[in-house]
Image: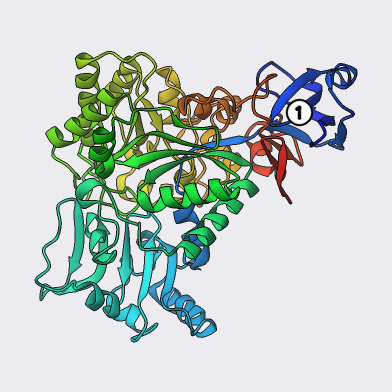
Amino acid sequence: MTPPVLFHGGSIHTFARAGTVPALLVEGERVAAVGTLDDCRRAATATPREHDLAGRTLLPGFVDAHVHPLLLGDALSGVDLSGARSLDDIVRLLRTHAERDPDAATVTGYGYDQSKLAEGRHPSRTELDAVSGERPVRIQHASGHGYAVNTVVLRTCGIDADTPTPSGGRIDRDDDGEPTGVVFDSACDLLTGPDGVKVANHGPNFHLPLDDSEARRQLALGQRALLAAGITSACDAQVTGREMRAYLAARDSGDLAVRVHALVLSSGLPHLEQLGLGGGLGDDRLELLGVKLYADGSVIARTAYLSHACCDDPAPSGYLYHDPDELASLIVAAHRLGLPTATHAQGDVPIQIVLDAVARAQEERRRPGLTHRIEHCGFPTSTQIARMAELGVVPVPQPMQVTLYGDSLLAEYGDDGGRFYPMSEFADAGLPLVVSSDGPVTTPDPLRAAAVAVTRRTLDGQTAGGRTDAGPRQGIAAQAALRGITATPARLLRCNDVGDLAVGRLADLVVLDADPTTGGADALDTATVDETWVGGARVYRR
């Protein structure tokens, strides 16, 4: 039997009480005692193994309320294109990788952003043909909403001038109507092959076929990145049969180190209805949480549905995945099952559609404790924020995107662009403040994301949202940001056993080299994860 573990010798923040405690005792998977060193030693049922923090800081494990672990592993296994600043950069990086790995069946990359490229556009199939004319070349946009592919991929997938563009999707074409190689959102169904996952107009399809060994490898890579960031609980914000099979296999083999809460994509909702599956199915390692839906596209890819009310003359205006009645019927159906919904909505028009649907669902049947979410919630109006508070709808933004993409939004939309993810307005309305990653859209790094929630600082050093005498507009307090990566998302995921370190809670914790609770945003920005523990076992050490 594993002996108890006694932590002491540093700053221990339980978040279940104010300030710090001198010691914390873990027995089995749970916190057994907090208090003085003597109190914890007396509480131990056997001689504990003492873990001297040596001046470091211990916090509850971080909770990421919106992330894609398998997609994160896929991104980490391909070429990192986030630093590319021209189309030539992309071709050079991919070609170098292809030459180093001539046996790879497909050349893949992740993270290009057309707004950061000198040419200001997506790569074309002919440019990617310069990487390889024989092997498939497929690179994923930074938003995760689509791909640029070469001619081999288009030919293999049967995408040509006669292929209709699906509803809620995008196939870019040249003046002759031929596909350029850019395929986004629901059109990505065409990339998964005849036997692959199909989601129709329910979202971007990044569920490309994986065999069992590749699924294990990608999940291992994704988990490793999460644990290195101190993330012990993660909400997978888009699960199909592909992801669920990988999670079940990892759980059964003992390889599921991160606690996973699954949001099933709304294309799977009819199956949940047929089985009568409501919330709460699973255990503290793997749980079916609710349903993920999509209302509009991506701000980063400029396919979000933005009206003049939230951004000044945006172009393009983007698109909706569903007509309002169809989306409302999906949200109501999930509500009837007792499942929380998490709907991707960036512009004010789709946000309003979601709010109207939630109101309709609640009028039909009150379900106390059932919380619906709006994922991202980039450009809500002040009236919509107040309505969210009335309905109990929680926004789940990703502040790190303010740093990575805020400069281009400010350049295109002016002051309106600086209002992207209006965190301080959420706070003023009394809404829970959640800080998530959408990894791999942004690299999971809760401490840095919390710092950006405070500073609103972009890559070019601008403050998105402007400044006031009290500090940056749309920024929140450092303590609220810290709770936004621990206790607040834990409660949103209906997890009462994580997010703080009270006696009886699961012993999910992180050890940092410095105390992020002192010094505001700077302390958040510089602290580093040294160790990550899940259920009383150390699963990562720097």
Q: Mark 1 points at which residue?
A: 27
Which picture quadrant has residue 429?
A: top left
What percent of the width, then of the height, locates residue 195? 27, 63
Residue 78 left/right relative to 199: right
Residue at (44%, 55%) from the top-left corner? 71
What type is the residue that disc 1 sits on?
Glu
What percent of the width, then of the height, locates residue 190? 23, 64
Whether residue 157 is visible to the viewer of this picture, yes or no, is yes
Whether residue 317 is visible to the viewer of this picture, yes or no, is no
Which picture quadrant has residue 12?
A: top right
Badge 1 density bin: few <14, some 14–19, many ≥20, Cα 10 Å: many
Colour pattern of the rendering: rainbow
Which quadrant of the rendered structure holds the N terminus? top right
Which picture quadrant has residue 137?
A: bottom left
Residue at (31%, 17%) from the top-left corner? 391
What percent of the width, then of the height, locates residue 276? 28, 30
